[in-house]
């Protein structure tokens, strides 16, 4: 239903910089799965990435959450799919969630690491799809 990425500048991702996504939810009676997609380079110096995620509803209600995105295992091997020095990890953010109202939602994502500016993150994305409910 929605799959979009924002490219992070080569010089790094500043704490002050947000990736912003506008998503139109047409049917708020259906459940959805929401994923945070992270493309990191092998030069990324950490095993995880903390993200601050704000979701703003069409009526202006705001939900804030801090999400720990694990990018590598305990041995330092990158998780997810890789090609060249780039790896894609899909982090389940919300599963079988029903949006409170129909309309345009804004997702704002910023990095929450201790460093003011982090390198090695290539893209941040959001994917939203209809949830498959077992019957």
Image (cartoon, rainbow, N blue to C red):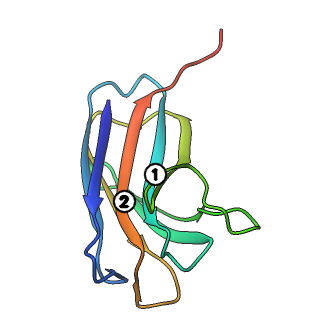
Q: Position of residue 66 (x, y in %)?
A: 54, 67
Q: Is label 1 in a helix, a strand or a loop?
A: strand
Task: Specify the quadrant of the image occupied by residue 122.
Answer: bottom left
Q: Residue furthest front?
A: 84
Q: How many marks?
A: 2
Q: Which residue is mark 2?
A: 124
| Label 2: few (<14), some (14–19) or many (≥20) C-alpha neighbours in 10 Å | many
Task: Residue 36: give its label.
Answer: 1
Who's the residue at 60% across and 70% down the image?
48
| Picture quadrant of residue 18 | bottom left
- Mark closest to the chain's N terminus, 2 or 1: 1
SS at mark 2? strand
- The residue at 29%/52% (across/down) is 5
- Measured along the vertical axis of the image, is residue 18 above or below residue 71? below
- Do residues under tags 2 and 1 come within 8 Å of each other at their CB atoms? yes
User: Left or right: 85 with respect to 6?
Assistant: right
| Furthest residue toward right | 74
60 and 34: which one is in front? Answer: 34
């Amino acid at each position: 239903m929605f799959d979009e990425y924002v490219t992070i500048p080569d010089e790094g991702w500043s704490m002050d910089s947000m990736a912003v996504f506008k998503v139109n939810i047409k049917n708020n009676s259906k459940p959805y799965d929401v994923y945070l997609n992270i493309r990191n380079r092998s030069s990324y110096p950490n095993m995880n990435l903390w993200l601050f995620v704000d979701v703003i509803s069409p009526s202006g209600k705001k939900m804030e959450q801090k999400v720990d995105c694990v990018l590598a295992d305990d041995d330092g091997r990158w998780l997810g799919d890789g090609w060249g020095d780039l790896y894609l990890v899909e982090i389940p953010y919300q599963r079988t969630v029903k949006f409170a109202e129909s309309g345009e939602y804004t997702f704002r994502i910023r990095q929450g690491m201790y460093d003011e500016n982090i390198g090695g993150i290539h893209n941040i994305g959001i994917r939203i799809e209809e949830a498959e409910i077992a019957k």
